[in-house]
Image (cartoon, grey):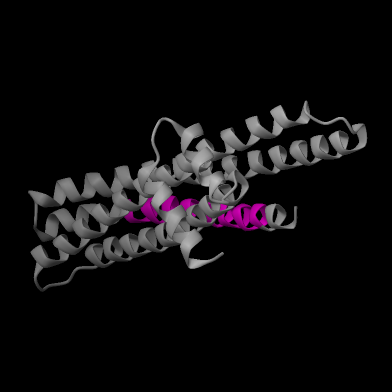
Amino acid sequence: MTFLRRFILIGSVCSLTACSSMYYGGLEKIGIPKREVMVYRVEKARDTQEETKEQFKSALEQFTALTNFKGGNLEATYNKLNGEYEDSVKKAEEVRKRISDIEDVSDALFREWEDELNQYSNASLKRSSQQKLTATKAHYKQLITAMKRAEAKMAPVLSVFKDQVLYLKHNLNAQAIASLKGQLSLVQSDVSTLIAAMEKSIQEANAFIRTMEKQ
């Protein structure tokens, strides 16, 4: 994909309005079809999930470091944890936005594809296009299901992080930190489950991209 096309598509994520049909129509007039927009957005969602996975790992490392605190600047350690939590919230919001962008363009693409089936006069070509549409929809369903499953697993982790940050905010002492150690195994388990779900989603994204590029 050329730099210009990438620049236009990057802008599309920022300027998307409720009038999607007009927007996608404008892109097609300059040679960027919905299929290309969809692949690009899946790529961006995949990359965002990779970044988010690393962010949650970093937040867990900071939480673990805090529970192992044995002296030093406790406030600075708390500030690091709070910063990791806030960064994790931002990445979670970005993931949700990426998924929404994919759903928007996929809806437009599939509606257009279905409408065009009625325009065929050649039965064999129509049947072939219908089969490809059915297969693409099925693959897309696997993709979006995996992405939403991973996205849903972020909320419990963020909830636990938020509780710890709020509690520590007014209880910056060794006793408070000791009470958090009991939560460590739960947080580790939740983050591990989240990471596994994200890796599955990333694999689905890569498979979907390969399929779309072959068509």
At 39% from the left and 52% from the top, the residue drawn is 11
Q: Is residue 184 magenta?
A: yes
At 90% from the left and 33% from the top, the residue drawn is 122
Indicate the position of residue 79 as horizontal and vertical percent values: 14, 61
Indicate the position of residue 104 as horizontal and vertical percent values: 51, 36
Q: Which residues are magenta?
A: 183-209
Extreme-right residue of the structure = 124
Which of the image's four quarters has the N terminus? Answer: bottom right
Q: Is residue 140 magenta?
A: no
At 32% from the left and 46% from the top, the residue drawn is 158
Indicate left or right for 78 with 104 as reference: left
Which image quarter: residue 124? top right
Q: Is residue 195 visible?
A: no
Q: Is residue 185 above or below residue 23?
A: below
Indicate left or right for 184 with 164 as reference: right
Indicate left or right for 76 with 28 as reference: left
Nearest the eye: 189 or 125: 125
Q: Is residue 135 visible?
A: yes
Q: Is residue 43 above or below residue 25?
A: below
Q: Main secondary structure of the magenta part?
A: helix
At 43% from the left and 60% from the top, the residue drawn is 7
Nearest the eye: 83 or 112: 112
Q: How many marks?
A: 0
Extreme-front residue of the structure = 29
Indicate the position of residue 30 as horizontal and vertical percent values: 53, 50
